[in-house]
Every structure is written in structure tokens, then in C-alpha cells.
């Protein structure tokens, strides 16, 4: 059966119209889905703004003032002089370097050891509940309590790790490594939980097929498992890096910032709470906030499409 050119033109026009209608419906569906998503997250966003917006804005305003809690009536607006004072201080940069070292080393160790623990918990067949429960014990302990146990273990004549004549918490490098060990020991279970959630999404059939094709366990891990759990790795690393950069409690209990082991949070605490210098303390708090924001931005940009919810086609 043949069709005339006029009929072919009508059919093509109808097909084009049908395609356009389908595109409009898909676009409307996406808009409705996006609107629903915004409505669902709106209450949480409003609550977060109500709780966090005022303290952040107040800290920003205080950082632009010469404010001393011992002299509440002598506040003076000085623009960015506090930032110049802090950023030209060797104390700030020393604590910043210590904080970055603790953050990087602890995050790397927690990622590696957390991945091993996650694989063990994911693959365990016999006694799975017991293995997972025992692995989560360190994370269930209050950080201050855990820090005191590490302090007693490494204090001379108190712990079996420190016999007479040995006092590692009185030296810089040994104190730093003990702080890192305390951080890693406490938060490996948290990292393992996030990574185990990613491992649960890796198809077993895909791993079996790769095994049948001759890929060993190492190749299967790097070629299949790691690419598929990149979003989980991003979330785990992002959360832990930001948390590690704000480390305070372990340092406060173990060394109290002695031997140049203060973190940026410890220095801010010393100026704001001990020194009652609201201007300088707020400035340090704002700088910590900016640094964590930059770190989060770099993480998301570095992982790109691995970020949860990202869709490279939307930017086209």
C-alpha cells in the first residue's frame, strides 16, 4: 500500500506533534517532581535557617567589632581588623597546620580501615549480628569518656602503655599521633556504616560475572565496587573530614592544647571562653566556617557526578 506525499506530510506532522506533547508532559512531570522535592525539604530548611542563621549572622557581625565581654559597653566597629590580626598570627597558623594534619591523616586512615571493616561486616555469614554489634562499640561510647580512657592509657604510671619514665602526652609528635589514634578508633565504625550502605548496592551478579571472566578479588574491587560506591565514599569522607577539622574534645581531654597541639577550635575556645574576647573568637569561628565550606565545595567538585543527586545532563 502506497501513500501520497500529502498523506506522508500529515503523518509526519502528527508524529512531530505527538513527540512534542510527550516532551511537554515529561517536562511538566519533572517540574512537578522538582516542586514536590522543594516542598518536602522546605520545613527542614526553614528549621535549619531559624536555628543556625541568627548565630552565624551574629558571629559575623561580632567579628567586625572590637568586642570584649569584660567591657560590654566599649564595643567598637573596626571592619576587618580582627581578620588581619588573626591571619597574621603565628598561633593561628600553627593550630591550622596541626588541624589540617590531624584531619588528613585521620580521614585517610578511617577510609582505609573503615572500608576493611565494612567489607568484613558485609561479607560475614556466621555471627553477622555479633560482628556488627561489636564493631560499633567504640562509636557508641561518648567521645569525652573515650578520650579519658586514652589519656589514662598514655599517662605515666597510670596505664600499662606508659611505664615510669615514659610520658608521650608531654611531647608534640607523640601527642599528635595519640590524638589521631583516638579519633580513628572512635569513628571507624561510623565510616564503616556509611561504606557498608554503599556495598549493599553493588550487584552480586556483576561480581560473579567478573569472577567468571577471570578477574581476581583486587580487580573486582577497583573496577566494579569502588566506582559503584563513589557516592557513599563521598558522603563518608565529606562528613568525617568536616568533623575532623573541628576536632576539639579529644585534644581538650588529652593535652588541653599543650605542646603546640591546639586545633583551630581550641584556639577559638581559648580566646572566646577563657579570654572573653568576643571579636577575635568570633573571627576564628567565621574562618573555621569558611574553611569547612571550601572543603565541602572542593570535595563535591572533585567527585563530580559521584555526588548524590547530581545529574550532568541538567547543566546542558
Image (spheres, rainbow, N blue to C red):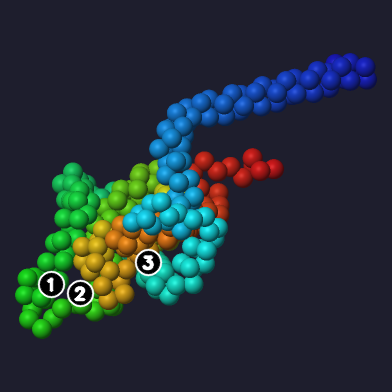
Q: Which residue is mark 1?
A: 155
Nearer-the-camera pick, 161 or 76: 76
Residue 1 left/right relative to 285:
right
Nearer-the-camera pick, 100 or 299: 100
Query: The C terminus lies in which quarter of the figure?
Result: top right
Callout 1 touching callout 2 (CB < 8 Å): yes
State how far apart marks 3 and 1 are (Cα). Answer: 23 Å
The disc placed on residue 1 is none
Q: Looking at the picture, does residue 256 appear above or below residue 240?
A: below
Callout 3 touching callout 2 (CB < 8 Å): no
- Give residue 130's position: percent from left, percent from top: 15, 47
Say which label, 3 or 2, has the lower sequence index. Answer: 3
Callout 3 touching callout 1 (CB < 8 Å): no
Residue 285 left/right relative to 160:
right
**Which quadrant of the structure image shows residue 201?**
top left
- Give residue 131's position: percent from left, percent from top: 18, 50
Q: The residue tagged with tag 2: helix, strand or loop? A: helix
Q: Which residue does the image show at 23% across and 69% down from the upper left?
A: 255
Crowding at mark 1 (Cα within 10 Å: few <14, some 14-19, many 20+): many
The disc placed on residue 169 is 2
Q: Looking at the picture, does residue 8 appear above or below residue 66?
A: above
Viewer can see residue 228: no
The disc placed on residue 99 is 3
Residue 20 left/right relative to 234:
right
- Give residue 238's position: percent from left, percent from top: 42, 53
Nearer-the-camera pick, 11 or 290: 290
Say which label, 3 or 1, has the lower sequence index. Answer: 3
Amino acid at each position: 500500500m502506497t501513500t501520497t506525499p500529502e498523506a506522508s506530510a500529515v503523518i509526519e506532522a502528527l508524529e512531530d506533534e505527538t513527540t512534542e506533547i510527550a516532551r511537554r508532559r515529561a517536562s511538566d512531570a519533572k517540574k512537578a517532581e522538582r516542586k514536590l522535592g522543594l516542598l518536602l525539604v522546605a520545613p527542614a530548611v526553614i528549621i535549619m535557617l531559624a536555628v543556625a542563621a541568627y548565630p552565624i549572622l551574629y558571629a559575623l557581625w561580632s567579628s567586625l567589632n572590637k568586642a570584649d565581654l569584660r567591657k560590654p559597653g566599649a564595643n567598637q566597629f573596626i571592619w576587618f581588623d580582627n581578620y588581619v590580626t588573626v591571619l597574621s598570627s603565628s598561633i593561628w597558623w600553627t593550630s591550622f597546620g596541626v588541624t589540617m594534619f590531624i584531619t588528613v591523616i585521620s580521614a585517610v586512615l578511617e577510609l582505609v580501615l573503615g572500608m576493611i571493616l565494612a567489607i568484613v561486616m558485609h561479607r560475614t555469614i556466621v555471627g553477622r549480628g555479633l560482628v556488627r554489634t561489636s564493631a560499633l562499640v567504640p562509636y557508641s561510647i561518648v567521645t569525652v569518656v573515650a578520650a579519658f580512657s586514652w589519656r589514662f592509657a598514655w599517662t605515666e604510671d597510670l596505664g600499662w602503655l606508659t611505664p615510669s619514665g615514659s610520658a608521650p602526652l608531654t611531647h608534640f609528635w607523640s601527642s599528635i599521633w595519640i590524638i589521631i589514634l583516638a579519633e580513628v578508633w572512635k569513628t571507624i565504625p561510623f565510616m564503616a556504616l556509611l561504606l557498608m550502605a554503599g556495598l549493599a548496592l553493588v550487584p552480586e551478579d556483576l561480581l560473579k560475572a567478573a569472577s567468571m571472566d577471570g578477574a581476581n578479588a583486587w580487580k573486582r574491587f577497583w573496577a566494579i565496587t569502588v566506582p559503584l560506591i563513589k557516592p557513599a565514599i563521598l558522603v563518608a569522607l565529606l562528613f568525617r573530614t568536616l568533623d575532623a577539622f573541628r576536632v576539639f574534645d579529644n585534644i581538650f581531654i588529652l593535652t588541653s592544647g599543650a605542646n603546640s597541639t591546639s586545633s583551630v577550635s581550641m584556639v577559638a575556645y581559648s580566646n572566646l571562653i577563657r579570654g572573653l574576647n568576643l571579636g577575635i573568637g568570633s573571627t576564628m569561628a567565621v574562618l573555621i566556617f569558611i574553611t569547612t565550606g571550601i572543603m565541602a565545595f572542593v570535595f563535591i567538585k572533585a567527585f563530580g557526578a559521584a555526588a548524590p543527586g547530581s545529574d550532568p545532563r541538567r547543566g546542558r
